[in-house]
Image (spheres, rainbow, N blue to C red):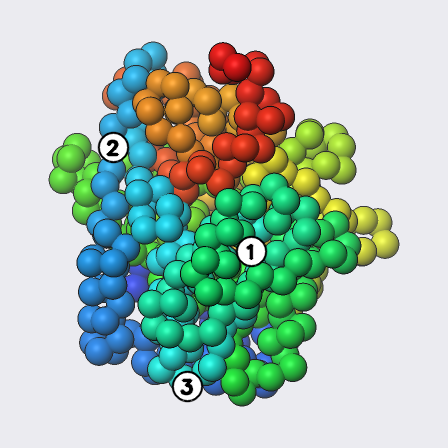
Amino acid sequence: MNISAEISINVKNGTLNASNDGYFGQYGGIFLKKPLAEINEFFQTKVYTKEFQDELLEYYKNYVGRPSPIYFAKNISKKGAKIYLKREDLNHTGAHKINHCLGEVLMAKKMGKKRVLAETGAGQHGLALATAAALVNIECVIYMGEKDIKKEYPNVLKMKVLGAKVISVKTGNQSLKDAVEAAFEEYLKDPINQMYAIGSVVGPHPFPNLVAAFQSIVGKEAKEQFLGQTGKLPDNIVASVGGGSNAMGIFAHFFNDQSVKLYGVEPAGKGLQTSLHAASLTKGIPGVIHGFKCYYLQNNNGEPMKTHSVASGLDYLGVGPQHCYLKDIGRTTYVTINDEEAIDAFFVLSQKEGIVPALESAHALAYALKLNKELDENQTILVNLSGRGDKDLEYVIKNYGKHYIHV
């Protein structure tokens, strides 16, 4: 079903509004109600109070460095549409993750929790949560797949320096899915003293709502900034989608602006014709996993499939329920970029604009570069540059450097 100009999406504070039981259409829900009721009640009654918002916004301004700027990338925009970058890579900790981590840790502290638990793939969520936990003096435990620990070791070292305990997950594919399962299992052992601080708009209600609410600051800023710089709204917004938090952040406050096309970019990995990808919306089937309903990658027997992406933060078999809903109603177009295209975009931005992007962000940039060639110079594209690539340098140079740099 396609959304028409006459249809208005139900939004609240700039984000999609879930039903009382946590559904966006048929997606989402809460299949682990009891331990999450306390989190949901606090979110619904306290997060939007003036006291909580004032404290959070103070941290955003003077600790994170918000608002993050919008930059016109003129060197990569010469032959088509104008490409603009929302520079979330300039945030303290180097990515958008700090936006919701500060919110989650403040919630945990005010709820009297002794520790926060989380999963991480690329390490950006773990790093941001460890940072926020140090700030408010609360214990932090991060679960990370053994494969991702080796790949993203600079972030692992930072987490440890910040005082977090990093636990290696050696089960399954040793990646993000396995870290999610291990962290949530540990949380359920003691939901009284600890809080699960999820890393994306996934999981059972209220986590998709909660993370989207904290990430909506990105879209709110972007709308004001883009209007201020160009006098109009962007024609196209592009963001990478793994779980989907950075995309929900930049899409916020634009859902009912029908002139703005929204694009979510999934990882095609080694190719959609193989099993080595993580394109949940493109190749997945609706079902229940990790306590909520979404499109996820499964085999003919309904068993979860292993996934792959060159970007660890996109290497997840499911996706946030908001994105599933947006796909079904046709408001957002979901496309794919493979590993090679993402690597190429990584070096294009580095060598043409002097900005080294995270591999997750490079997927969005790669699609923007494709779109740029299809549109004329009067069109605009806003990309959420969700993180910087420090964490990826060793891996990229080792595996792809000889094709792009002088060594």
Please tell me which residue is depicted at 41% across the width and 16% down the height of the picture.
Answer: 373
The kind of secondary structure element at disc 1 is strand
Query: Which SS class for mark 2?
Result: strand
Q: Tell me the quarter of the picture where residue 62 sits.
A: bottom left
Q: Nearer the viewer, residue 396 or 198?
A: 396
Relative side of 300 to 394, left or right: right
Which is nearer the N-term, disc 2 or disc 1? 2
Q: Amino acid at mark 1?
A: Thr
- Identify residue for label 1: 120
- Tell me what residue is drawn at x 47 percent, y 74 percent: 139
What's the residue type where badge 2 is placed? Tyr
Whichever of labels 2 and 3 marks the residue nearer the N terminus, that label is 2
Whether residue 46 is visible to the viewer of this picture, yes or no, is: yes
Q: Residue furthest front?
A: 161
Q: CA distance from mark 2 to mark 3?
A: 40 Å
Q: Which mark is residue 71?
A: 2
- Graded by Cα atoms within 10 Å as few (under 14), some (14 to 19) or many (20 or more), the crowding at tag 2 reads some
Within 10 Å of disc 1 (Cα), the crowding (few <14, some 14-19, many 20+) is many
* Vertical side of 190 occupied by 324: above or below: above
Mark linked to residue 112: 3
Contact between marks 2 and 3 (CB within 8 A): the answer is: no
Q: CA distance from mark 3 to mark 1?
A: 24 Å
Marks 2 and 3: which is nearer the front? 3
- Amino acid at dot 3: Gly
